[in-house]
Amino acid sequence: MKYKRILLKLSGESLMGDKQYGIDNNRVQQYAQDIKTVIDAGIEVAIVVGGGNIFRGLSAEKSGMERAQADYMGMLATVINCMALQSAMEDIGIDTRLQSAIKMEQICEPYIRRRAMAHLQSGKVVIFGAGTGNPYFTTDTAASLRAIEIKADVVMKGTRVDGIYTADPEKDPTATRYDEISFQEVYDKGLNVMDMTAITLCKENKLPIVVFDMNKEGNFIKLAQGEQVGTVVR
């Protein structure tokens, strides 16, 4: 296997499947099966999940809500998604631990770096909820930060598109996909990969990012095995 420890970033929108809002159980179950395939291959997996399918702080701010309050609401939404993914994984026999950056003792552990790493080393999937626990930071930034903290080999961002394009492929049919691109090119071209704080964290810590289509079954294990799937940023 190419990687020993992977941080998988899933957007909240990816959990919607074909729905307009909320959680598509079929999509979550597919993700759980794909994650199990990677775990069964002996790779350690940690996960960060967004909350945009339930609540998005930036959108709420535009409608007049105070930004910090809206962001905290978004963090709670991520925990709901984490619990749904945790349930789907445990239903198929994956041992998991959910850790939150905001204390919620009744439903998850607090985020403790050393404990998270011990869980990973013992074969458990660790799911990180509530972002960084701070307003004004996205779950992309949380994914980069947690990946660096737990010494992951790579951040894999599972999306609904199969990589990074020169333009939005859903709007521009002439857009072409990059197989590999540098962090500097992402800056220079203003590509919408992850937010710039997340990109900078990865760049400064020499942590590669892979953007790929998580909705296509088998892509996750192919990446873990070193196949060329999606776009690599390094």
Image: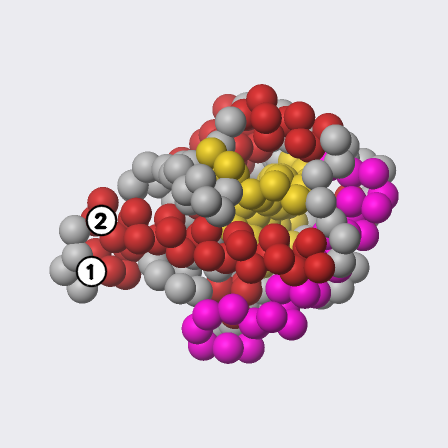
Q: Nearer the viewer, residue 179 or 98?
A: 98
List x then y, in percent, for residue 104: 41, 42
Q: Residue at horizontal 71%, vertical 59%?
A: 91
Q: Is residue 214 in view from this perspective?
A: no
The amino acid type found where label 1 is placed reads Lys
Residue occupied by mark 1: 62
Where residue 148 sits, quadrant-wise, is top right
Q: Nearer the viewer, residue 232 or 32?
A: 32
Of badges 1 and 2, nearer the viewer stands: 2
List x then y, in percent, for residue 203: 52, 29
Please state, as top left, top right, bottom left or bottom right, where the C terminus lies in the image: top right
| Residue 33 part of the magenta-drawn span | yes
Please state, as top left, top right, bottom left or bottom right, where the N terminus lies in the image: top right
List x then y, in percent, for residue 129: 48, 44
Q: Residue furthest bottom?
A: 19
Q: Is residue 211 in view from this perspective?
A: yes
Tag 2 secondary structure: helix
Residue occupied by mark 2: 69
Question: Is residue 49 positioned above or below 142 on the image?
Answer: below
Q: Nearer the viewer, residue 190 or 230?
A: 230
- Report the label total: 2
Tag 1 secondary structure: helix
List x then y, in percent, for residue 223: 76, 48
| 108 sits to left or right of 157 | left
The amino acid type found where label 2 is placed reads Gln
Q: Residue at horizontal 60%, vertical 30%?
A: 116
Q: Residue at horizontal 63%, vertical 27%?
A: 117
Question: Is residue 122 positioned above or below 88 on the image?
Answer: above
- How far apart in space, not on screen, are marks 1 and 2 (Cα)? 13 Å
Question: Is residue 97 positioned above or below 24 on the image?
Answer: above
**Number of other residues with Cα within 10 Å of mark 1, as a class: few under 14, some 14 to 19, many 20 or more:** few
User: What span is colored magenta in the figure?
Assistant: 17-44
